[in-house]
């Protein structure tokens, strides 16, 4: 077994109850295989979003993606926080996510952020099915990104995502991040967020 495969195995969720294998295997890596995401796989990722549910079927999600080596890729890197910059440049693809703020009647779409998240959730599982990892990032200067890419005001940029096939070497990261890549994954227990009949934990 190769070192990257070993890392993937160790990151499988130690779930309390049995869940779909793709959900157990998904995690947010900071290293990626040095391979372009194929066009076919990219279309499959966006197709997964396309068929996600959305409030009134408004499909408010929008994406701007760029491949490593392009000017647009460097522009996305430039908008990331310093800590995200250190690892996100390992990804062959970077993407900005955004939503359309208004309904067709020009009113505020209060569920647009929800629907973007739902679309990204489906995309993340579809990616996992194809051996592709998606590491979501809130750490970016969304105002600057909006300006740099001339994104109209009616859209709100939410996040950046580093996308690539699982793989890569721990040496691709500085020491501090190498530890994070293989540290134990933790979650709060179900009784802290799923309440029956009344709000709160006993
Ligand atoms: C909306 C969102 C924003 C995130 N922002 C960042 C970020 O800026 N930098 C980072 O390294 N990870 C970021 N993450 C990744 C989370 O830290 C990660 O999902 C969480 O620690 C759980 O780890 P796992 O995805 O490996 O299970 C973000 C995840 C989400 C969903």
Image (cartoon, grey):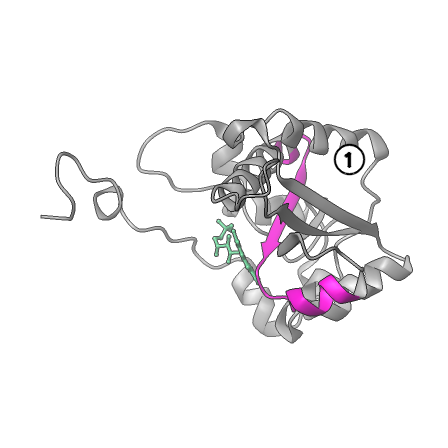
- The reply to whether residue 127 is in sight is yes
Q: Is residue 65 above or below residue 125?
A: below
Q: Is residue 58 magenta?
A: no
State the residue at coordinates (62%, 24%).
51
- Residue 17 vs residue 168: left or right? left
Q: What residue would you read off at disc 1? A: 42
Give the farthest residue toward the front. 105
Give SS at disc 1: helix
- Find the magenta span and give its range: 127-147
Nearer the observer, 116 or 35: 116
Q: Position of residue 85 (x, y in %)?
A: 70, 69
Q: Is residue 172 above or below residue 4?
A: below
State the residue at coordinates (62%, 33%).
59
Q: Is residue 77 above or below residue 94?
A: below
Q: Is residue 139 magenta?
A: yes
Task: Count every numbered label the image shows and give the total.
Answer: 1
Nearer the observer, 35 or 107: 107
Q: Position of residue 142 (x, y in %)?
A: 65, 64
Give the farthest residue toward the left. 202
State the residue at coordinates (64%, 40%).
61
10 Å crowding of disc 1: few (<14), some (14-19), many (20+): few
- Residue 143 vs residue 113: left or right? right
**Label 1 CB-ligand 1 distance < 8 A:** no
Q: Position of residue 181 (x, y in %)?
A: 56, 59
Q: Quadrant of the N terminus?
A: top right
- Residue 181 vs residue 62: left or right? left
Give the farthest residue toward the right. 70
Q: Quadrant of residue 58?
A: top right
């Amino acid at each position: 077994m190769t070192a990257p495969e070993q890392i993937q195995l160790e990151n499988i969720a130690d779930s309390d109850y049995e869940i779909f294998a793709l959900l157990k295997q998904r995690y947010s890596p900071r290293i990626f295989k040095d391979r372009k995401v194929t066009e076919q796989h990219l279309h499959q990722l966006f197709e997964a979003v396309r068929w996600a549910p959305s409030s009134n079927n408004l499909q408010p999600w929008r994406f701007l993606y760029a491949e490593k080596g392009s000017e647009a890729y460097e522009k996305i890197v430039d908008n990331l926080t310093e800590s995200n910059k250190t690892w996100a440049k390992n990804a062959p693809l970077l993407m900005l996510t955004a939503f359309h703020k208004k309904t067709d009647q020009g009113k505020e779409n209060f569920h647009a952020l929800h629907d973007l998240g739902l679309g990204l959730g489906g995309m993340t599982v579809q990616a996992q099915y194809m051996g592709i990892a998606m590491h979501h990032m809130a750490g970016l200067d969304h105002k600057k990104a909006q300006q740099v890419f001339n994104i109209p005001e009616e859209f709100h940029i939410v996040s950046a995502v580093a996308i690539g096939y699982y793989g890569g070497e721990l040496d691709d990261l500085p020491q501090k991040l190498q530890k994070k890549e293989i540290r134990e994954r933790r979650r709060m227990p179900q009784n802290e967020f799923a309440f029956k009949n009344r709000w709160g934990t006993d």
